[in-house]
Image: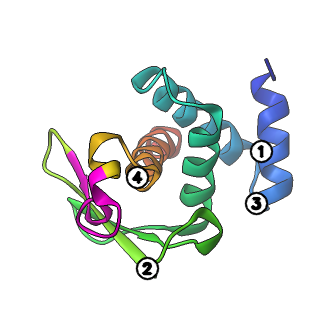
Amino acid sequence: MLSQGKIASEVIEEAGISFDEAVLICEALEYLKRKFPSKASSWYVRAIYRFLFGVKQLDEKRWAVIGLPELGDYYQSYIVYFDGEKYTCDCHYRAFGYVRRAKVCTHIASVILYRQYKKRLRVIKE
């Protein structure tokens, strides 16, 4: 298994972010892995890619995730909603949504990463 420092170094190179930010992303990823331990490694990679290149918080309960054609997205953006207990993505109501509803889509996973990253960033800044 790759060390956290090695993964962080690769993320820095690909995304052009600082080492400290990359470490926070790795910590957020570890949280995601604990929450969804049976997911394939490709699922985590897709979630990180979406997080790095396309999550924007709209308000307290909604995030826009940019649609990425290279990941099979058909739409420019997807809205993820969190009601305090459960996440919902509007991809659940679009093409092949019945498949995504049965699983956690990587749009939702990217928002979970985003929220965990922001939480850790706030702690560092305080």
The secondary structure type at the circle numbered 2 is loop
**Type of amino acid at the residue the image marks with label 4:** Val
Q: Which residue is mark 4?
A: 111
Q: Nearer the viewer, mark 2 or mark 4?
A: 2
**Type of amino acid at the residue the image marks with label 3:** Ala
Residue that appears at 30% across and 59% down: 97
Category of crowding for the residue at label 3, using alpha-carbon neighbours closer than 10 angstroms: few (below 14), some (14–19), many (at least 20): few
Image mark for residue 19: 1
- Residue 40's x, y, as percent? 58, 31
**Type of amino acid at the residue the image marks with label 2:** Tyr
Image mark for residue 15: 3
Image mark for residue 1: none
Picture quadrant of residue 71 = bottom right
What separation in Å lies between label 1 and label 3 (alpha carbons)? 11 Å
Q: Are marks 2 and 4 in contact (CB under 8 Å)?
A: no
- Look at the picture and state if 66 lies above or below 47: below
